[in-house]
């Protein structure tokens, strides 16, 4: 039966533990990066929209052909909705995603000469683009650390590490931005995502071999 070891930290001492957490994760995942295949900001923006409730692997399979057909924002803006729906169907929620892509592309053409903007305000003003998507694009396509991407892995592990007590993505992001050095904001979400897929999956975390075990309040040992 799983048992919790004591004295691994609390929410209050998160600022003292964060340096160790970041460094241990960097050592564990030295190649952590965005796994959505893209060659430019537009491709990353499209891929990120498609990634909602879908795996990166599936998105990359779909965009491999999609990016060959649609090269520019105008290509997407002019796309036949039914054809685009069929092309992205396997990513799920394809009708809503089609509407988001078409609306976003039309905004890019009308307001930004077809180019993806590189500011948070301009990105979230695009139809179908929220802060999470904007953070992905800014951090990975433009190298700008404006925030921290909060997905299900980040939410779960940040709570397990007691870096936050919230479940709301906006509140979690604010907590993490206060703790994590700004230069590491983009990387930190990748590190937690890779950790969530590797050593710390929700159903069976491998706490006994996890490098964060000594500083993780949620770590469990003795699991058989």
Image: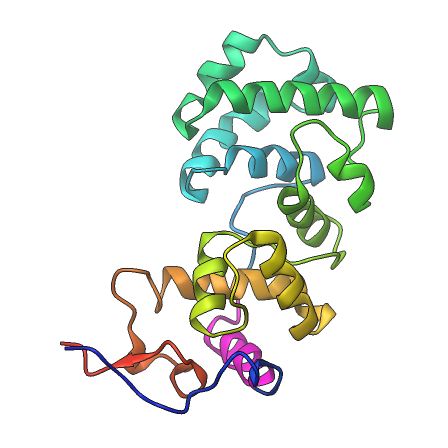
**Figure quadrant of residue 222:** bottom left
Q: Is residue 58 left or right of residue 163?
A: left
Left of 3 or right of it: where is 126?
right
Q: Is residue 32 visible?
A: no
* Residue 119, placed above or below residue 24: above
- Image point 56% across, 86% down: which residue? 13
- The spot of residue 116 in percent (x, y) is 77, 35
Q: Quadrant of the N terminus?
A: bottom left
Q: Residue at x 45, y 62 (%)?
A: 194
Which region shows up in magenta? Answer: 17-32
Q: The C terminus lies in which quarter of the figure?
A: bottom left
Q: Residue at x 42, y 80 (%)?
A: 216
28 drawn magenta: yes
Compared to residue 50, the image places residue 211 above or below, namely: below
| The quadrant where residue 18 appears | bottom right
Where does the image place residue 37, in percent across and percent down from the top left? 55, 43
Residue 206 lies in magenta, yes or no? no
The spot of residue 132 in percent (x, y) is 62, 46
Residue 119, placed above or below residue 64: below
Question: How far across and how far down the image is residue 38, in percent?
Answer: 60, 41
Pick the residue in front: 124 or 211: 124
Q: Residue at x 59, y 8 (%)?
A: 80
């Amino acid at each position: 039966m799983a048992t919790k070891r004591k004295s691994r930290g609390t929410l209050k001492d998160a600022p003292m533990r964060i340096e160790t957490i970041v460094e241990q994760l960097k050592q564990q995942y030295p190649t952590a990066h965005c796994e959505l295949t893209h060659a430019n900001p537009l491709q990353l923006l499209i891929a990120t929209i498609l990634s909602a409730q879908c795996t990166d692997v599936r998105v990359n399979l779909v965009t491999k052909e999609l990016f060959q057909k649609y090269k520019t924002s105008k290509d997407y803006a002019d796309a036949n909705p039914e054809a685009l729906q069929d092309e992205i169907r396997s990513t799920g929620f394809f009708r809503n995603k089609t509407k988001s892509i078409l609306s976003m592309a039309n905004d890019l053409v009308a307001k930004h000469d077809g180019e993806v903007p590189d500011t948070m305000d301009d990105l979230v003003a695009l139809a179908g683009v929220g802060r999470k998507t904007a953070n992905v694009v800014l951090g990975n396509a433009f190298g700008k650390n404006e925030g921290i991407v909060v997905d299900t892995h980040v939410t779960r592990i940040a709570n397990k590490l007691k870096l936050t007590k919230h479940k709301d993505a906006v509140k979690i992001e604010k907590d993490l931005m206060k703790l994590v050095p700004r230069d590491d904001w983009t990387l930190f979400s990748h590190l937690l995502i890779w950790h969530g897929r590797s050593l710390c999956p929700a159903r069976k975390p491998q706490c006994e071999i996890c490098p964060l075990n000594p500083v993780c309040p949620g770590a469990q040992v003795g699991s058989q």
